[in-house]
Image: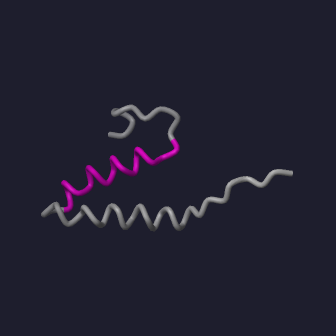
């Protein structure tokens, strides 16, 4: 019986949150900050097809 890979989802979520926080300070307001945050979150999501209209 083969063991499957172990993924620490909470750990990766924390790493992702820290990455988003690291560039959040580059934006003066919250509105422009949401666009790259949403894009990164969409790219990392488990979507079958990642078209721009889906990520928007």
Q: Position of residue 16 (x, y in %)?
A: 41, 61
Magenta region: which residues? 30-46
Residue 20 found in image quarter: bottom left
Write the residue at 73% across / 53% down: 4
Position of 4 with respect to 44 (left or right) is: right
Query: Which residue is situated farthest in the right direction here?
Result: 1
Residue drawn 20% across and 56% down?
31
Q: Position of residue 12 (x, y in %)?
A: 50, 62
Q: In terms of image quadrants, where is residue 22?
A: bottom left
Q: Residue at x 47, y 32 (%)?
A: 49
Residue at (36, 50) in percent of width and height: 40
Q: Is residue 11 left or right of residue 29?
A: right
Name the residue nearer the viewer: 23 or 49: 23
Q: Main secondary structure of the magenta part?
A: helix
Question: Residue 19's quadrant in the figure?
Answer: bottom left
In the visual, does 6 lie left or right of 27? right
**Mark count:** 0
* Quadrant occupied by the C terminus: top left
Residue 45's x, y, as percent?
A: 47, 47
Residue 45 belongs to magenta span: yes
Percent of width and height locating residue 26: 17, 62
């Amino acid at each position: 019986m083969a063991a499957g890979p172990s993924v620490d989802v909470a750990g990766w979520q924390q790493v992702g949150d820290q990455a988003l926080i690291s560039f959040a300070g580059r934006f003066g307001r919250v509105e422009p900050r949401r666009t790259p945050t949403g894009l990164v979150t969409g790219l990392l999501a488990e979507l079958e097809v990642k078209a721009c209209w889906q990520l928007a």
